[in-house]
Amino acid sequence: MIEIIAFDADDTLWHNERHYDEAKEKFKQILTRYHDPEWVESRLDATELQNLKRYGYGIKSFALSMIETAIQLTEGRINGNEVQEIITIAWAMLEKPMDVFDGVRETILMLSEQYKLLLITKGDLFEQEAKIARSGLGDFFDGIEIVSEKNPAAYDAIIKRHQVVPRSFVMVGNSLKSDILPVLEIGGLGIHIPFETTWVHELVPESELEGKDFIRLTTMAHLPALLASL
Amino acid sequence: MIEIIAFDADDTLWHNERHYDEAKEKFKQILTRYHDPEWVESRLDATELQNLKRYGYGIKSFALSMIETAIQLTEGRINGNEVQEIITIAWAMLEKPMDVFDGVRETILMLSEQYKLLLITKGDLFEQEAKIARSGLGDFFDGIEIVSEKNPAAYDAIIKRHQVVPRSFVMVGNSLKSDILPVLEIGGLGIHIPFETTWVHELVPESELEGKDFIRLTTMAHLPALLASL
């Protein structure tokens, strides 16, 4: 018996990665007179990954990584006005209107009448709360859990707190690494709804999926019918 | 009957403001050839306050505010190497060893045998989790709540989640604004343990304290005896 349906937020309920991609384009333009765009992007990706342990996820971390990359790539020649342009890219990201995927609102509304719904998102607490508020979807959820890392221990704590057994817990998300594999590990059910682009940090090699049972849907709109059939 | 004792973390259990003060000194040194230190500090304070709504609390926010202030104060003339020096200040803050106040560990250990203990801290989720882990105090708490803002609604949600009545909930902290007044507002008990310095953003005018009942202790070590006497 399924009791709780938990949803990832970024790129599951609404666009997120797109805003990072747009920001990277603007960043590359600022550095265009120093380096070619591919090199700038690969350096930025490397700095970001390296800084995850230092800063955690989110736009502020991304802003600091952009600035650090710009300094390195210009050997310190970048000036204050250009750094301000980079900061302004981050400001625009922090204020982006929420772009909720088609069919998400209806599906969430429908499921909220029958199940306990949770929102489980990793990343920056302040930024994620602001996005949930702006999305207008917060009220449909019985609980919102913002964790710094989506690992089996984090899911286990959530399940215990909500006093259900793992088998009655379903996680819906676009990331195999964060939303599906750790939930399978603790005995929950995973429903993968892939998104067009996946952040390089979230990619999982095929070999890690061997012998793993999970469901893959093309769209959130198919979720109520699937749940009814389980 | 008191059931839950909740503690603020920064400048209640361990030093925090001190690290910001040290960082500000280093920041003023970097800008010393552009402006006098008092002006630099007042501009930084203003930028920080203005950015709270944009970024939330924490070291990453502070880093971005330092950079922004440096750009403004140099009219964009600050160079990449100087910006990197500012980023390095933030890195040092993120790695500071935890400086737990005298008597705190013993008090927490003692109280944990008798009460349900919570840690309630506002700020950056990633940074606060890292600090709790480094402090070695995490295991003494039955729950850790990291909220983006400490207002009556946040405390109310915590109390409801832990299924106690407000009168059995005690909050211990150094900030009247964040730890005491909102808790009094929902009917809980507030125990104020002032710290030597209080961030300007957290100051409360005397007039707002009129008619408010709360307890003030000079040190955490007096807490067990006080609780026993209630």
Image: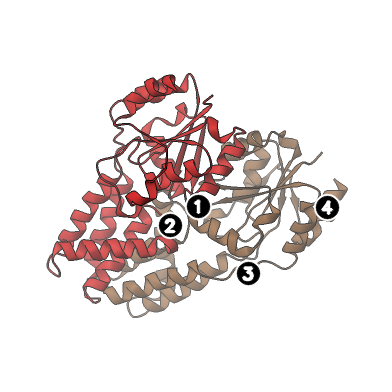
Chain colours: A red, B brown
> Disc 3 residue type?
Asp
Callout 2: chain: A
Asked if badges 3 and 4 are on one and the same chain, I answer: yes
Which sits earlier in the primary sequence, circle 4 or circle 1?
A: 1
Quick check: marks 4 and 1 in contact, CB under 8 Å?
no
- Chain bearing tag 3 is B
Q: Determine which of the numbered discs, if any, sits on residue B125 in the image.
A: 1
Residue ID for mark 2: A56
In the picture of the structure, the residue carrying the numbered disc 4 is B226
Q: Are marks 3 and 1 on the same chain?
A: yes
Inter-mark Cα distance, 3 to 4 = 25 Å
Q: Residue at x 33, y 35 (%)?
A: A193
Q: CA distance from mark 3 to mark 2?
A: 22 Å
Report which quarter residue A65 is drawn in: bottom left
Pointer 3 residue: B99
> Looking at the image, is mark 3 or mark 1 earlier in the sequence?
3
Q: Which chain hosts label 1?
A: B
10 Å crowding of disc 3: few (<14), some (14-19), many (20+): few
